[in-house]
Image (cartoon, rainbow, N blue to C red):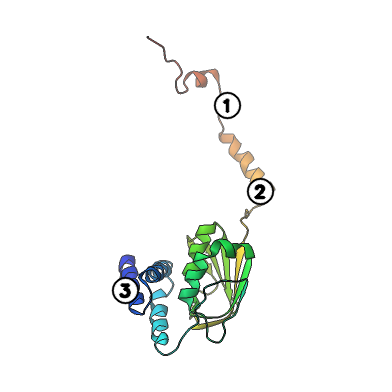
Amino acid sequence: MKSLSEIETTSKRASRAMGFSWGVAEEVAKGIRLLEFFGLPGIKNLNQYYKDRDNRNYENSKIIKKNNKPNKLPYCPITLGVSFLDQIKKIEKFKKCTFQKIAYPILFLPFLSRSSEIIGKKLLFQFDKNEFLLNFNVNISSNFIRKKFPSIAKKIEVNFLDNKDSFTGTEWKNLYKLSEDTFVEETDSLKQGAAGAGLTDND
């Protein structure tokens, strides 16, 4: 079994060999490492994407808007991902942004995951009735596990989710009230044994 370090190093070198700058190649490598760490087929899809790039071109995107549509060709998931990561503070204000035609959407996924960590919010990534919930770059949950990832996603939506508790105020109060049973009432003996108590000044 290949180590994550091997996966990252080889992905970086392969990406540089495909013409990406060392900086972009490093971002790709981090993403592939992340996908493989979460059990998603990063190496397989990166391999296939690079093979396809030999036969066709993909559109680059520098400025991310609320609604994004390529001129003719599908978006390159790598340049789109780098742009998304670089502009995440501005994109966050949209609350939701859409894209049409992204090649190999799985390669766009780790850029979204890392963006989630930067802004401290969960992101919901949806395409063609498939959903991925990105949790602060800590884990990725989805209804798409064990399915084959498409080479082209036609309609894509990224939603920025507000941070909120998964429980009600009443549920929290009930649990907190139960926790109060562990509180120790302060007594005179406890005060005397507290830090600094009982010390004498010999000067």
Q: Which residue is mark 3?
A: 13
> Which structural element holds mark 1?
loop
The amino acid sitting under disc 1 is: Glu
Q: Earlier in the sequence, mark 1 or mark 3?
A: 3
Residue, disc 1: 185
Does residue 168 lie above or below 189 as drawn?
Answer: below
Q: Amino acid at mark 3?
A: Arg
Percent position of residue 154, x then y: 58, 82
Label 2 neighbourhood size at 10 Å, few (<14), some (14-19), many (20+)?
Answer: few
Res 109 seen here: no
Local secondary structure at mark 2 = helix
Q: Are marks 1 and 2 in contact (CB under 8 Å)?
A: no
Image marks 1 and 3: residues in contact by CB distance under 8 Å: no
Q: Residue at x 59, y 35 (%)?
A: 181
Q: Circle 2 sits on which residue? A: 171
For the residue marked with disc 2, what is the amino acid? Glu
In what element is the residue under mark 3? helix
